[in-house]
Amino acid sequence: MSHAHALRAPAPPFQPATTLSVNDLAERLRETGLVSVDRLVLRSSVTAFADRIMRVTAHRDSDARDGLTTIYDTRRDTQQAGYGGFTSSELAPHTERSGIPRPPRLMLLVCAYPAATGGECLLTDGRAVHADLAAHHPDALDLLSTRHTAFFGGGDGHASQVFTPRAEGRVSLRLRLDALARWSPLVEPHLPALRAAIQRHQLTLPLQAGQGYLLDNSRWLHARTSYTGDRLMWRALGEPLPQLTPLPTGFRPAPRTPDRAPEETAS
């Protein structure tokens, strides 16, 4: 088995959100950073689930009533940078709110109405990408971990780097790959290797009504395929409540293995 395939984790099975205790959720987030849930068919049930685990934070696109963001094709934001989520176009892998000093730790995304075609969620574990680069492109990993080699966001964005060392040997991830990402000339030649590693470890997660996922935004990247139809999602962003802690930031890097060429995988 190739190094790339060995790091690819299967998408976790969907479980009814009401059957998962806070302790269950905390354990899964600490272990893998990702939980798949279902039976959240009403907006109120999404809000209730989010309120069990996070302090929902308001932002530019959230509803003042409950803090959720309704994501759909508005048919008016097609050319505006930073509003790609409100179109039917594909979205590149990214960290939610990468352009602020401290992105939210948790993101909950739930399907209210699926697309007619397309619209699959694409998820990538930063730990797998980090290990892939460490094995096959160590120079790229070193530069992508160098302070202030990227700038994410508009004029009020944030200077950062893709991988940031944290306490106790952990690493956190921050990324965007759209028009609001600017790079040091030293890093730009290594972006193809980064993109390829992300694609190799990408999980496809089609969502039906009531299904969704909860992820650690300091570890996982999320993306989306283009779609047709009236796809509608509800999203909550926030910080973990005390009962979910301790929730260490990011991931503990995988042990380094001998260099082997990564295999291409179907996408």
Image (spheres, rainbow, N blue to C red):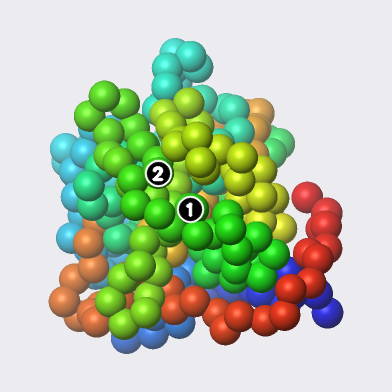
Measuring 81% from the left and 66% from the top, which residue is drawn there?
261
| Rendered view: 37 above or below 248 | above
Whether residue 151 is visible here, answered yes or no, is yes
Q: Residue type at mark 1? A: Leu
Q: Which disc, if any, is residue 144?
A: 1
Residue 250 in the figure: left or right of residue 177: left
Q: Residue at x 40, y 44 (%)?
A: 149
- Residue 125 appears at what percent x and percent y? 54, 64
Residue 208 relative to residue 31: left or right: right
The crowd level at tag 2 (other Cα within 10 Å; few <14, some 14-19, many 20+) is: some
Can residue 35 be seen from the camera position used here? no
> Which secondary structure, mark 2?
loop
Q: Earlier in the sequence, mark 2 or mark 1?
A: 1
* Circle count: 2
Residue 83, x across and y down, in percent: 41, 26
Compared across the picture, whether 115 is left or right of 15 comes to: right
Quarter holding the N terminus is bottom right
Provide the secondary structure element on which disc 1 rests.
helix
Please tell me the numbered disc located at residue 56: none
Q: Nearer the viewer, residue 178 or 261?
A: 261
Instruction: Residue at 16% x, 76% y: name it.
Output: 242
Point out residue 49 in the picture as x, y percentages from the top left corner. 31, 64
